[in-house]
Image: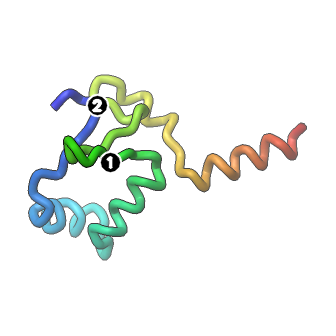
């Protein structure tokens, strides 16, 4: 646990204890798509998910996170303002 990534060790336990409570009705595959949308990268070798703005020792960086759709909208707004 380096604080730069996280690993889902027990997928079944994650589904029952986390997804069902915090993301009701969300299937695991959908959760993974959401991670991708928020810019998380999956490392197959270490089987971990990481995002440069999601660090244990730097919680303020999470404020800089955005979805890919959000980035496109932000760029469109900036173009209109010019």
Across and down, in percent, residue 77 comes to: 78, 47
Instruction: Tell us which disc is closer to us: 2 or 1.
Output: 1
By what rule are the colours in the image chosen? rainbow
Q: Residue at x 29, y 72 (%)?
A: 27
Q: Position of residue 35 (x, y in %)?
A: 38, 54
Q: Could you tell me which secondary element the residue under label 1 belongs to?
A: strand
Quadrant position of residue 33: bottom left
Image point (44%, 29%), residue name = 61
Q: Secondary structure at mark 2?
A: loop
Q: Residue furthest right?
A: 82
Residue at the disc numbered 2: 4
Front residue of 46/6: it is 46
- Could you tell me residue 76's position as x and y percent? 77, 49
- In the rendered image, the residue lying farthest to the front is 45
In this rendering, position of residue 30 left or right of residue 7: right
Report the quarter where the N terminus lies: top left
Classify the position of the C terminus by image quarter.
top right
Examine the rendered structure and indicate whether residue 2 appears above or below residue 65.
above
Mark 2 or 1, nearer chain start: 2
Q: Which mark is residue 2?
A: none
- Residue 3 spot, x, y in % from top left: 24, 29
Compared to residue 60, the image places residue 15 above or below, namely below
In the displayed structure image, the side of residue 53 where residue 18 appears, left or right? left
Identify which residue, 40 or 44, lies in the foreground.
44
The CA span between labels 2 and 1 is: 12 Å
Residue 46 sits in which quadrant?
top left
Identify the residue under disc 1. 42
Q: Which residue occupies 17% across, 51% down?
A: 8
Residue neighbourhood size for the residue with mark 2, other residues' Cα within 10 Å, grouped as few (<14), some (14–19), many (≥20): some
């Amino acid at each position: 646990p380096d604080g730069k990534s996280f690993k889902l060790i027990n997928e079944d336990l994650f589904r029952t204890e986390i997804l069902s409570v915090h993301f009701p009705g969300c299937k695991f595959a959908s959760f993974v798509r959401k991670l991708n949308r928020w810019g998380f990268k999956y490392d197959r070798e270490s089987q971990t998910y990481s995002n440069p703005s999601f660090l244990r020792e730097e919680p303020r960086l999470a404020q800089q996170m955005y979805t890919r759709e959000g980035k496109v909208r932000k760029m469109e707004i900036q173009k209109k303002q010019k």
